[in-house]
Amino acid sequence: MAKKSAIEKNKRRRQLVARYANKRASLKAIVSDSSQPAEARFEAQLKLSGLPRNSSPSRVRNRCALSGRPRGYYRKVGLSRIALRSLASSGKVPGMVKSSW
């Protein structure tokens, strides 16, 4: 089980990313648009750097929904490999069976 503080910090980051997503996208569009004047692009870049660091999507860490484990994470199911295996062994994941040959 991961530390509760790490899990809560990640939740706060996800909320900040959601809150600033539109603003960040519009500023990035201005910065990458070469038809805009250089001053406007520079202003947009300054505003973008003025936003909170944790509002950037790259600062969010994918964590297991059950254990909070950050490694061995499967995006498709939102679980770590260990949690997925235990659920699959107990028959809780539809269509997934333990392999044997």
Image (cartoon, grey):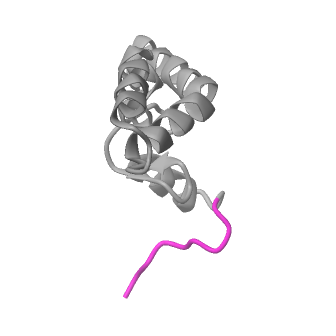
Which quadrant does the C terminus fall into? bottom left
Residue range in magenta is 93-101
Q: Is residue 7 magenta?
A: no
Name the spot of residue 12 as percent of width and height, x first: 53, 17
What secondary structure do most residues of the magenta stretch adopt? loop
Figure quadrant of residue 9: top left
Q: Is residue 63 visible?
A: no
Name the spot of residue 79 as percent of width and height, x first: 50, 47
24 or 101: which is nearer to us? 24
21 or 75: which is nearer to us? 21
Q: Relative to 95, say whether 91 is above or below.
A: above
Given the current orientation, which residue lies at the most extreme bottom position? 101
Q: Residue at x 39, y 46 (%)?
A: 32
Q: Is residue 10 found left or right of 23 in the rendered image?
A: left
Q: Relative to 77, say whether 98 is above or below.
A: below
Q: Is residue 38 found left or right of 77 in the rendered image?
A: left
